[in-house]
């Protein structure tokens, strides 16, 4: 599967997608995959990317390809 995907009309890399989800720069990102779900806001396709915003944290983020909806899963138990 290609590393780059189209999100909200523009081509993004895994790092760029992670930055859209996180709102700031990230250290590293895994390849983008299709999430097995539809966007709750618009029904569009949802992409998933795992990334590290800092050395001690790993986050799985999801972002709709068609609208601004996004969510994150962290390993925190708080």
Image (cartoon, rainbow, N blue to C red):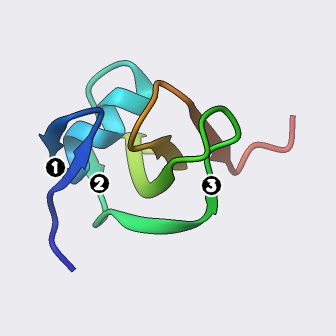
Q: Earlier in the sequence, mark 1 or mark 2?
A: 1
Q: Which mark is residue 50?
A: none
Report which residue position mark 3 lands on.
Answer: 38
Looking at the image, residue 69 lies above or below residue 13:
above
Q: Which residue is mark 1?
A: 13
- Whole-angstrom CA distance, mark 2 to mark 3, is 22 Å
Decide if residue 57 is in sight here.
no
The spot of residue 7 in percent (x, y) is 28, 41
Q: Residue at x 34, y 40 (%)?
A: 18
Tell me residue 36's x, y (percent): 61, 70
Mark 1 touching mark 2, by CB under 8 A? yes
| Residue 23, horizontal then vertical, whole percent | 39, 19
Residue 78 visible here: yes
- Dot placed on the residue nearer the N-terminal end, 2 or 3: 2
Mark 3 and mark 1 residues within 8 Å of each other at the beta carbon: no
Work out whether 78 lies above or below 32. Answer: above
Task: Examine the image and state in which quarter residue 41 appears.
Answer: top right
Mark number for residue 29? Answer: 2
Tell me the quarter of the image containing the N terminus.
Answer: bottom left
Depth check, front residue: 23 or 77 = 23
The percent position of residue 31, horizontal first and vertical second, equals 28, 66
């Amino acid at each position: 599967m290609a590393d780059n995907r189209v999100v909200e009309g523009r081509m993004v890399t895994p790092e760029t997608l992670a930055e859209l989800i996180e709102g700031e720069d990230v250290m590293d990102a895994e390849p983008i995959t299709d999430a097995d779900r539809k966007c709750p806001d618009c029904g569009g396709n949802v992409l998933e990317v795992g990334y590290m915003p800092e050395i001690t944290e790993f986050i799985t983020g999801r972002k709709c390809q068609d609208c601004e909806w996004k969510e994150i899963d962290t390993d925190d138990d708080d």
